[in-house]
Image (tube, grey):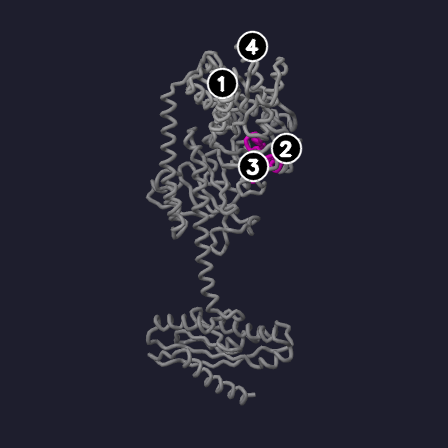
Amino acid sequence: MIGNYRIIAFMTCRIQDRENHELIYALCKKLSEINCRLFVYNCSSIYNCSSHIDDTINENDPQTSVYEMFDASFTDAVIVDSDHIGNLSVCSKIVNRALGMKLPVISLGERFDGCINIEYEHQAGIADIVNHLAEVHGISDFHMIAGSKGNGFSEKRIKTFKDTLEKRGIPFDYSMVSYGDFWSDPAVAAAEKLLNEGRLPQAFVCANDHMAIAVSLFLQNQGISVPGDVAVTGFDCIDTIFSSSPTITSACINNRLISEKICCILSDIFKSGMREGSVRLFPEAVFNESCGCKCLNKRDLSALFNEQTNQFYRFQDENIKLSEIAARIPQCSDFEEIAYIMREDDLMYAMCCLIRQEYTDDSVNPETDSLCDSDGGLFVLYDSDMIDYKKTLGEKFSPYYMPKTDIIPTLDYYLNDGRSLIFTSLDYLGVSLGYVCFHFGDHSTGNYYKIPQTVNMLNNALGGFINQRHKHYLLKRIERMSGTDALTELYNRRGFCTEYDRLLETTGDAPLTVIMCDLDGLKIINDTFGHDEGDNAIHTVARALKDVCPKNAICTRFGGDEMIAVYPHRENDPDIRLLFCEYLDRYNAGSGKPYTVAASLGIYVTSRGEQPDFEELVKRSDSLMYEEKKRRKAAR
């Protein structure tokens, strides 16, 4: 639960399909009656496959990471819309994860052990239609235009078609079946082939409405009357069947019935703890003009055409704007700029976008998923409602970090408002970046159509932006590496000269402090203890030099054990030589090494206006070091 509400996780795919989001809308309304709220976890696209066909999508595809977002700490039940997801390995993974969390699971369409299975008897709708055509309209010559060959749904409907005919004493053979791949053109091609062969049946039984409408139009264009010469039926009960001419006979399982059944099951779960069982739901046939019946729900064709035309042009317009946004985002200088570009055209409303915290670090490569198990928080890149609210106050929205446990900003408000939350994952080149959450306040088909195009745009645009940041980081790192000594991490000669020129530009005539450092006894350490220990001694002296110098000092290793540091001279500088010796004393006391790291240090200050080049610095430093070593020998 979250607050006073039980949370129901609904796993689905292609929420942009009308039958899908209409089910979610109906379910959301029913769930509010039992004090529940719906969290929808959606893949924009996934390939369907049946139990006897190899999966055509990897269960670890980054899109499916959205199905792992539900958590037992706030989820009360899980609904797996296996009928729409289709991929059984993906569905099994969701079911097993939920059962492992001791959560009750409802499966829609497929049977899984340990679950409450709502089984859709789609094929019964085919039987009802065939029986109706035979009994009411006296038809005995049938041809079925099925979906895709090998598709589980299609093959079940073919079997029902065959069994129903045989029960009626009508001989069946597979010449009575064509495949239309669930699309208009292949269905029309199948009907045309039969017409050319002189095998036109009395009735076409199509596996979905799109094919039925297309076949009906084709036949009428050929001068064949529907239903006078040939009856045509479909399946799914899409809106268009009620405005086509003639209206199309079809069948479907009503979304209202599904949502009511789910809510009844959930009530039983919460009251009695029920965890397993089966419920069968049957489609309802809708008999229309295409089989010879009257249509009781005919709709105005011009109104539907106008609605679909508006949706088409809206889609085109939004696609152009989203493409423009996608081109601008990778060029942004920071995340805040991205947020305001996204909100500019009022396209991305009622949504927030959250990316994994690690991808705000430009050193992280967005093309690898090495940090996919990171426990880091989330980065709220975009929140349309908060941007609008801040604008009314005359303030600017700034992206910010948020704990994963918060899920989305202002969650309580949306729960109290009765909204369902729709989560879709963000991914780039196969790597999960985060997710988008949509929280529409009303049920508008256009909102749901927009989800995949918005998410696809963000996948490419944000992935490109993060990738650009990482490339700039790599270029800077390469530039640093080309000017840095690998052992000591001090500048090499090339890097020192570049930084020294910049220093001279900023200091002008001001004097400089120059420090020469030379490791003592390197040959003895190398010969006695090995070159690895010699490298350790060099590295230790380099750390000491960098530590005691000011942060703006330019430190370089220009020889085997010779180093120079240069920085703007300061009055009342601390005793660098003393600090240096103390650093090495501390190291030697705790290193456990069988040798002592020591070094000679020479220091001088340039005159005002003096700007020696690198060669002059080395020459003076050599002279200074010679004097320093003589002094130290004399002092022993």
* Real-space CA distance between mark 1 and mark 2, rounded to the nearest whole angstrom: 30 Å
The residue to which callout 3 is attached is: 74
Q: Can residue 64 be seen in this view?
A: yes
Residue 572 drawn at (x, y percent) = 41, 76
- Check if mark 4's residue and mark 3's residue have beta carbons within 8 Å: no
N-terminal label among 1 and 3: 3
Disc 2 secondary structure class: loop
The residue to which callout 4 is attached is: 135
The residue to which callout 2 is attached is: 52
Towards the viewer: 466 or 514: 466
N-terminal label among 4 and 1: 4
Q: Which residue is located at x 52 percent, y 73 percent?
A: 542
Type of residue at label 4? Glu
Type of residue at label 1? Val
- Check if mark 4's residue and mark 2's residue have beta carbons within 8 Å: no
Instruction: Indicate which label's residue lies in the foreground, 2 or 3.
Output: 2
The residue to which callout 1 is attached is: 232
- Check if mark 1's residue and mark 2's residue have beta carbons within 8 Å: no
